Amino acid sequence: MSSHFAQAVHRASVWVADVATALGTRDRNFARRVLRAWLHTLRDRLTVDATAKFGQQLPELLRGMYYDGWEPSRVPMRYNQAEYVQRFAAEARVEPRDVPQLAAAVTHVISEHMSPGQVSGPPSRTGPRSPSGSSLGHQRLRLRSTIGSRP
């Protein structure tokens, strides 16, 4: 295995391991599914330009996961809270009631790995909130103005 590929595998593995830890599991496949669902539900709400700029911050192998199945002509998508939860739950293969906790855990890991200022701050309007007003995950992100956030 080339050293470049080994490094790419290592960087992706670190992110997935961190997600697994945040989720309280040793199941890396589960962590990867939840991370993928998080990335896809964010990606589909962003403009093409914002999607590309966010993707540049991801490790090479996770970038492939991020773009897998992307249809730029269909974005940005708008969906309400119930649609968000259903999309996330279906892709991650989890119960809808678990989505807020899972998405928040991934948001924390992503914010730890991104460049300072890339992911931060108070809740923005990139996604729906739960009925209680708590975060459902990446809507708590405020993407730098060079990326932009969805209204």
Image (spheres, grey):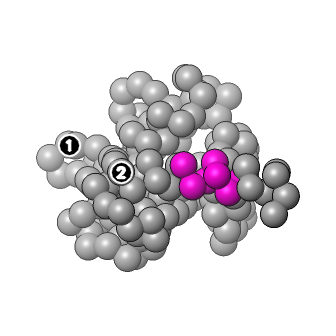
Sequence-wise, the earlier of marks 2 and 1 is 2
Any part of residue 35 in sight: yes
Q: Residue at x 73, y 49 (%)?
A: 7
Q: Which residues are magenta?
A: 8-14
In front here: 38 or 133?
A: 38
User: Which residue sits at x=45%, y=65%?
Assistant: 28
State whether residue 31 is above or below residue 121.
Answer: below
Name the amino acid type tagged 2.
Answer: Thr
Q: Are marks 2 and 1 in contact (CB under 8 Å)?
A: no
**Around disc 1, counting alpha carbons within 10 Å, would you say few (fewer than 14), some (14 to 19), or many (20 or more)?**
few
Q: Position of residue 147 (x, y in %)?
A: 64, 34
Numbered-mark total? 2
What numbered label is drawn on residue 21? 2
Instruction: State left or right for residue 75 relative to residue 81.
Output: right
Provide the secondary structure element on which disc 1 rests: loop
| Residue that label 1 marks | 133
Spatial distance from mark 2 to mark 1, Cα to Cα?
26 Å
